[in-house]
Amino acid sequence: MGSKPRVRFAPSPTGYLHIGGVRTALFNWLWARQTGGSFVLRIEDTDGERSTPENEQVILRDMKWLGLDWDEGLEVGGEHGPYRQMDRLEIYTEFANKLVDSGAAYRCYATKEELDAARAKLKADNPKAQFRYPGWWRDRRDWPADKPYVVRLKVPTDGYTTYEDLVFGEQRVPNSAQQDVVIMRSDGVPLYNLGCVVDDLTMGITLVARGRDHMINTPIQVLLYQALGYDIPQFAHLPMMLGKGGAKLSKRHGAVAVGQYRDDGVPAQGLLNYLARFGWSYGDEEVFAMADLIKKFSWDRCSASDGRFDPVKLTAIAFEHLKTPALIDDDAYATHTDPFLREMFGDYDAALVARALPLVRPRARTYREAAAAVDFLLLDEPVMEDKAKNKFLLTDRAQHLPALHALLGAQTSFEAAHVETEVKAWAERDAIKLGAIAQPARVALTGRTVSPGLFELMELLGRERTLARLESAIAMRDES
RNA sequence: GUCCCUAUCGUCUAGCUCGGCCCAGGACUCUGGCCUUUCACGCCAGUAACGCGGGUUCAAAUCCCGCUGGGGACGCCA
């Protein structure tokens, strides 16, 4: 093991991959990529009630979609495995025994019922009091032979536990505020604190970066490291991502599942860019390519105050990527739009779409919107918006259409620049405002009032389809 | 209730370490305008914040104290 940083992301498969979790994963990943260190992915599935293999699969799938690849962990393996906590039970038992043997922890035979009763009694006497484990078994060694027990950490009753947080600075928590927490359940499954410390220890993790909601656990974990005789890693806690109004971020504040963004057609790098800027800043810069982020990220530019998730800003940042070829080149754009095109149109003329997409980019907020915006090219007939049709095709506004048709019919080249020159010359000659020609023509060709430039459209559609659509538009008016 | 964390426009934030360049800058949103064959993009302009109260100082968003607000946690959850 060298001196390179080793960081990790350790989600619980108790639900889909949440964007708050992605932010944590991202910061760890950026640090590993910047420093040439390792990014470890492990699964903390000790909550048997809520963990499922399906959730685990979703998490792995979403991490891959985001491009947050890991050097060690599930699927890729590594020399510190296994990387799923339920596959590491013997290791925790070994460490728990070590703690009990050294006197740093002890067996507690109090049953859940006894604890509940004591808690209830205390609440009855004083509703505001905080229940704390009374230490019944703290100093006993008269352990019953065949009764279930949990393992509790013997927390010092005085003094302070301190550590340096890369984001929050020096932390100093009175031990008197802690209690003898359970670190191992009676069924031999470790609790979060034990599992986390043993894993970070045995996996050689040098820096633990996680959400601030875990900050409360850190003193206990520091105590665990010390009891086990290990140096503590560095810690970096990240401020919380809350929903609008300051409440815990949930579905009603917008999509929180990564999978939802993928399905909506939001680019992964846009999502990541938004998340990177949440609790981290680099002067006034806001739009970053991934390579930039890797280069510029640092813990000392992380903020300590909580923030609120804003789906509108996320869309804006994602749009910056979507419309900028330097951030997403045209080939990549086409590749990412492909699944949506297939979903909407089945097999399609990829070469034709590839020519149209660059014109659509400044108008599409997602890949899905981009796919929808080229429908007029892929459908035999454009889908007519009623309003557009009634206003531009069935009225006098369509009066120039026959002349336009005649002019275009006489052209051999349908290159945008050429058609533009010809049409503009005609308009000038006959003193017709270009808009009077363009809008009805646009509707005839696309069915909409909104589209890329008219002459580009003609080039894209080609001579035959352009003329045919103008003819049917003219016919529409005659029939009405 | 107890312990811990935090506090700049509606939101994300710069500035705070080393007080004056800040009657506070950028971005999103919103409004107005320009460009243009439409829309979008782009460009220009505008609205909008240092939570409150005390100090310290010639000078405080920046330092100190108090208050208030917000958040996390107090489980054989993670």
Image (tube, coloured by chain):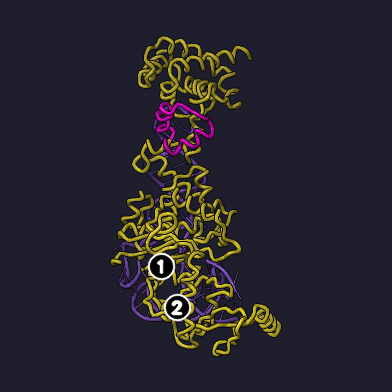
Q: Does the magenta stretch mainly form a helix, a strand or a loop? A: helix
Secondary structure under tag 1 reads strand
Is A58 located above or below residue A418 in the figure? below
* Foreground pick, A36 / B11: A36
* Residue A28 drawn at (x, y percent): 39, 61
Q: Please determine whether, in this image, residue A262 is positioned above or below residue A446.
A: below
- Chain B tint in image: purple
- Residue A355 colored in magenta in the image: yes
In this rendered view, identify the residue nearer to me: A392 or A48: A48
**Chain letter corresponding to the colour yellow:** A
Residue found 40% across the figure and 44% down from its top: A321
Q: Are marks 2 and 1 on the same chain?
A: yes
Q: Which mark is residue A224?
A: 2
* Residues in magenta, as a range: A334-360
Q: Nearer the viewer, residue A199 or A146?
A: A146
Q: Amino acid at mark 1?
A: Val
Give the chain of mark 1. A
Mark 1 = which residue? Answer: A208
Q: Residue at x 50, y 38 (%)?
A: A368
Residue A26 drawn at (x, y percent): 41, 57
